[in-house]
């Protein structure tokens, strides 16, 4: 295949090129790039597989084994340690945003919701922007309003509520709960 690609380069070269060495050199470089790209793709696949295996060991295998042994941490003879901690994640699906915000408000957590109001002005409208900031109305612009809960705030809320045994509607907040093994190596 490489010889065919080199031949195609030579055939496609402009007719006024007298040195086929330039075309051959170019085709060699293209083939080198193609080879490197293939190697990179293969290495990325291998890395992805290794990360998946590490994730399974960290999140499932080691935590299950340590739980069976009633251990949450372990100190090794070389001075390093192994610890399993719970990890949490959450997000609010767009389709359930209003329902999730209502749940937060009804449960005394409405202060977690950020309410951002922004107004956009065109070029050379600094005076109008200042006037709008001072008056906030009456300038003919409608503010855009965005309600959101910061991801880290939501994650902390989920951790706090789950660890204290409080209700947290998984379906409204795409709650994830799992384990992570941390190895602290001795320096």
Image (cartoon, helix red, strand yellow):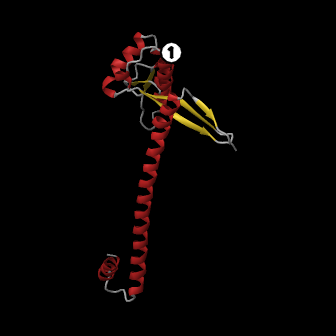
Which part of the image, by quadrant, shows the C terminus?
top right
Q: Residue 29 in the image: state x and y as whole percent.
A: 43, 74
For mark 1, give the secondary structure. loop
Q: Residue 7 in the image: state x and y as whole percent.
A: 31, 81
Query: Which residue is more in the foreground, 134 or 70?
Result: 70
Residue that lies at the very extreme toward the front in this rendered image: 69
- On screen, residue 187 versus residue 4, left or right, reads right
Residue at x 42%, y 50% (from the top left corner): 49
Q: Which residue is mark 1?
A: 164
Name the image quarter holding residue 166: top left
In this rendering, does residue 86 appear at all? no
Query: Which residue is more in the foreground, 119 or 139?
Result: 119
Q: Residue 130 in the image: state x and y as whole percent.
A: 50, 26
Query: Which residue is more in the foreground, 15 or 64?
Result: 64
Residue at x 48%, y 15% (from the top left corner): 111
- On screen, residue 118 versus residue 84, left or right, reads left
Callout 1 crowding tier (Cα within 10 Å): few <14, some 14–19, many ≥20: few
In this rendering, does residue 89 appear at all? yes
Query: Which residue is more in the foreground, 120 or 125?
Result: 120
């Amino acid at each position: 295949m490489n010889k065919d690609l080199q031949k195609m380069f030579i055939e496609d070269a402009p007719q006024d090129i007298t040195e086929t060495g330039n075309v051959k050199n170019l085709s060699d470089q293209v083939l080198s790039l193609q080879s490197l790209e293939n190697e990179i793709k293969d290495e990325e696949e291998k890395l992805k597989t290794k990360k998946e295996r590490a994730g399974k060991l960290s999140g499932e295998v080691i935590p299950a084994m340590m739980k069976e042994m009633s251990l949450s941490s372990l100190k090794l003879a070389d001075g390093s340690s192994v610890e399993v901690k719970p990890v949490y994640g959450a997000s609010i699906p767009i389709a359930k945003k209003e329902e999730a915000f209502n749940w937060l408000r009804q449960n005394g957590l409405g202060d977690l919701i950020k309410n951002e109001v922004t107004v956009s002005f065109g070029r050379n409208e600094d005076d109008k922007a200042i006037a709008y900031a001072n008056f906030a109305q009456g300038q003919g612009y409608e503010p855009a309003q965005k309600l959101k809960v910061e991801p880290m705030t939501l994650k902390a809320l989920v951790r706090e509520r789950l660890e204290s045994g409080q209700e947290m509607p998984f379906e409204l907040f795409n709650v994830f709960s799992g384990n992570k093994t941390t190895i602290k190596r001795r320096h």
